[in-house]
Image (cartoon, rainbow, N blue to C red):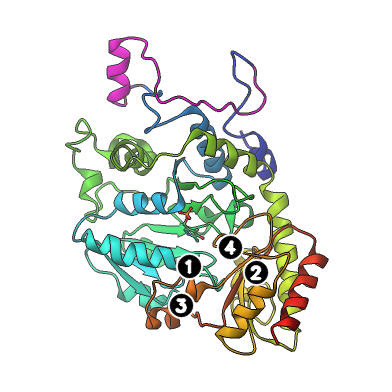
Amino acid sequence: MDYRFDTLATHAGYSPDKEHHAMALPIYQTSAYEFESVAHAKDLFELKAAGNIYTRLSNPTVDAMERRVAALEGGVGALAMASGHASMVATFLNLAEQGDEIVSSINIYGGAINMMGVTLGKMGIKVKFIDGDDLSAWESAITDKTKAFFVELIGNPNASIADVEAIADIAHRHGIPLIVDGTFCTPYLCRLKDFGADYIVHSATKYMSGNGTALCGITVDCGTFDFAGNPRFPQYNNPDVSYHGAVFGRDFGNAGFITRLRALILRDLGASLSPFNAFLIMLGLETLSLRMQRHCDNALKVAEFLEAHPDVDFVNYPGLKSSKYHALQQKYLPKGASGVFTFGLKGDRERAAKFMDSLELIKNVANLGDARTLVSHPATTTHSQLSEEQLRAAGITGQTVRISVGIDDIEDILADLEQAIVKSR
Ligand SMILES: *Cc1c(COP(=O)(O)O)cnc(C)c1O
């Protein structure tokens, strides 16, 4: 099957079932599946036969959505979980164990900084945060214990653009895989595999859902990273005691990572996606390209409006020619720079609050990628667990307002921004 993006977005992973011929994806709301025989059950448990056992491990509705996302990213497989964070934790734990290290950009979602820095830290996995724009910092953070690099292509919240291809080159030279969070770009704006990402994680809660109805995370295995003989990864080169002695870096072709993610990590962490949420994400994927293009087009108009406004102090949108990330945006995101960015009005934290409280159409919500335009105040919400120093490193101040530009009418969005700016004077 060699179809183009919009055909994959509407067809991949599901065709009408043979029994009922349902055109739309059925919701298989079941916890478990009947075995044909004791021997069949044994084969399923030993991964000798493919099939469903129990919905914590797999479900046909979830499977169809996973196949669609894998097709859109060009990966060998994908695994969905109950939220973006669940997928991230699972992805990290599939590579790193107690005593290991991960190198991460600091220009990422505040909740991820907290989860990685504090919770993974308590589990004995040390995450070194660096300035993601500083290529030499990636290289010098590497030790024998480094098991992964992590970065967001478009960083939350300031829409910084990471030079993923250059970061991948450094990682691969040292036998380290690169994990990229593609939440803001989605496979429509950038196919991260083409730039060297080995594993892609998404909060599908955002643009993939597109309407703010379902939490979901998904990890895509690009099938590009070879574990065989790599001394950093004994867990992929030695027989696994908790899985019938399988050697994950050898026995499953180039899908060892995603097989282990399901067979060990999802099995044991149990943060499975509900079939109903998979159905909602599948609906969102069908219109992904239409929505993303509108998000991008509207966001550029909002950014240009703000940049030209006398009350505005700064705008961080890589789609603007004035942005220091504009060249990277042209390289990685030629169709548009997505819909999320930050800006600040002249004044202080109080002015930002007065502006946000004066908005009528645009809602103050701790979410993004919704069809509707949303704002949030990172310093007091999504990034509030960060220290002053971390906030400074992440480029967030009390002035900073994050906007997720929706697909609502651009003239109405601009009018609401204008009246709230005037009221906040
Ligand atoms: C929201 C978000 C997450 C976390 O995803 P959840 O679905 O909320 O768990 C991770 N990364 C980025 C970039 C996000 O915006």
Residue 176 shows in this picture:
yes
Label 1: few (<14), some (14–19) or many (≥20) C-alpha neighbours in 10 Å = some
Q: Position of residue 243 (x, y in %)?
A: 23, 33
Residue denoted by label 2: 330
- 367 is higher (above) or lower (below) than 143: above
Q: Main secondary structure of the magenta part?
A: loop
Which label was assigned to residue 382?
A: 1
Which of the pair 171/131 is nearer the observer? Answer: 131
- 249 is higher (above) or lower (below) than 374: above
At mark 3, the secondary structure is loop
The span from disc 4 to disc 3 (Cα, nearest Å) is 21 Å
- Residue at mark 3: C-beta within 8 A of ligand 1: no
The span from disc 2 to disc 3 (Cα, nearest Å) is 23 Å
At mark 4, the secondary structure is loop
At mark 2, the secondary structure is helix
Q: Point out the frontmost of discs 1 and 2.
A: 1
Sequence-first disc among 3 and 1 = 1
The span from disc 4 to disc 1 (Cα, nearest Å) is 10 Å
Seen at 51% across and 68% down, the residue is 155
Sequence-first disc among 4 and 3 = 4
- 267 is higher (above) or lower (below) than 147: above
In the drawing, does residue 282 fall left or right of residue 201? Answer: right
Seen at 51% across and 72% down, the residue is 378
Magenta span covers which residues? 21-48
Seen at 39% across and 71% down, the residue is 385
Which of the pair 11/363 is nearer the observer? Answer: 363
Q: Point out the frontmost of discs 4 and 2.
A: 4
Figure quadrant of residue 280: top right
Residue denoted by label 3: 394
Q: Point out the frontmost of discs 4 and 3.
A: 4
